[in-house]
Amino acid sequence: MDKRAIGVFDSGMGGLTAVKRLIEVLPGEDIIYLGDTGRVPYGGRSRETIIEYSRQDIAFLRSFDIKCIVAACGTVSTVALEAIENDYPIPIYGVAGMAAKAAAKATRNGRIGLIGTKASIGSGAYNRLILAELPEAEVIGRACPLFVPLVENGRVGVDDEVLRLVAEDYLEPIKRAGVDTLIMGCTHYPIIRAMIGRVMGDNVTLIDPGGETAVYVSERLKNAGMLSGCTKGERRYYVTDSPDGFGEMARLFLGSGDAYDISQVTINNF
């Protein structure tokens, strides 16, 4: 048994979609979550800045006794993780690799759509990961920079006209390309899954990177004998901006009315 916590971080609140799935598959594990809400989004930053921010996020999580880290941020996973993951004594799991595997398995016609931040799309990492799994695949990518601020500001409903117009603008070219699988390459995007699905249609399989990674982490911990052995874990949440409104947003992402242990941290100290 290993009672150490699982650390999870994201540029904002989107990583809570991965936390939700971790709670479902690993209910007995303690989880420490960091949302870098003071610097969200990472998607428009330079590679050097994203690496710097990622190191600070990891340093904060490692100030606790943790057994692994989930980089629940598509931008970090595609831009920074390869450069830094071997610098730490505990495993760090990014969301991109598991999403690529799932998409390669799900596609029927080999045409895979990809949406994410500008940095994620520009890195080409998802393309490389998908082609490593399915060399004949055709990847059609599109940066969707407005999705993150829309989600962070609660514009998530299927009846939200602003979200609908933005989603149609971003997604229609990918739909016209004939993809049958779409990677939602940012952990914020599953919150607007209903709208994405409405635009793309019922015949397109949507891939949730955070959910796929949570299942993978669960399997790794079980196989390594590193589960806590507890029946219900504790969760602590940290943000780098004001925690006001966290409860409302957490309920949106986590889908529960629980009380949340939430604190603000000064990330520049790490």
Image (cartoon, grey):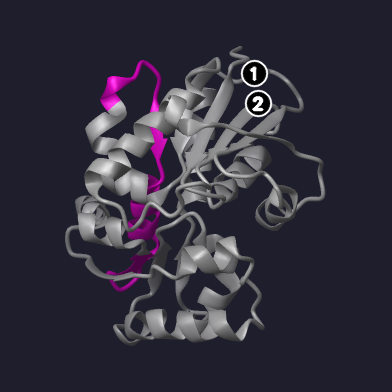
Q: Which mark is residue 159?
A: none
Q: Secondary structure at mark 2?
A: loop
Tell me the element at label 1: loop
Whole-percent x and y of residue 114?
34, 66
Image-quadrant location for residue 85: top left
- On screen, residue 57 above or below 20: above
Instruction: Specify few, some or many for label 1: CA neighbours under 10 Å numbering under 14, 14-19, or 20 or more.
Output: many
Could you classify mark 2 by the number of other residues whose Cα lies within 10 Å: few (under 14), some (14-19), or many (20 or more)?
A: many
Task: Give the number of the disc on residue 30.
Answer: 2
Q: Position of residue 11 (x, y in %)?
A: 46, 47
Q: Determine whether label 1 and label 2 are within 8 Å by CB.
A: yes
In front: label 1 or label 2: 2
Q: Earlier in the sequence, mark 1 or mark 2?
A: 2
Amino acid type shown at disc 2 = Asp
Dividing the image into 4 quarters, which one contains the C terminus?
A: top left
User: 75 or 178: nearer the eye?
Assistant: 75
User: x, y percentage for residue 72?
Assistant: 47, 44
Q: Is residue 80 visible?
A: no
Position of residue 128 in the picture relative to residue 3 (left or right): left
- Residue under label 1: 228
**Residue depicted at 17% across the width and 58% down the height:** 135
Magenta segment includes 104: yes
Residue 256 seen from this side: yes
Disc 1 marks which amino acid? Ser
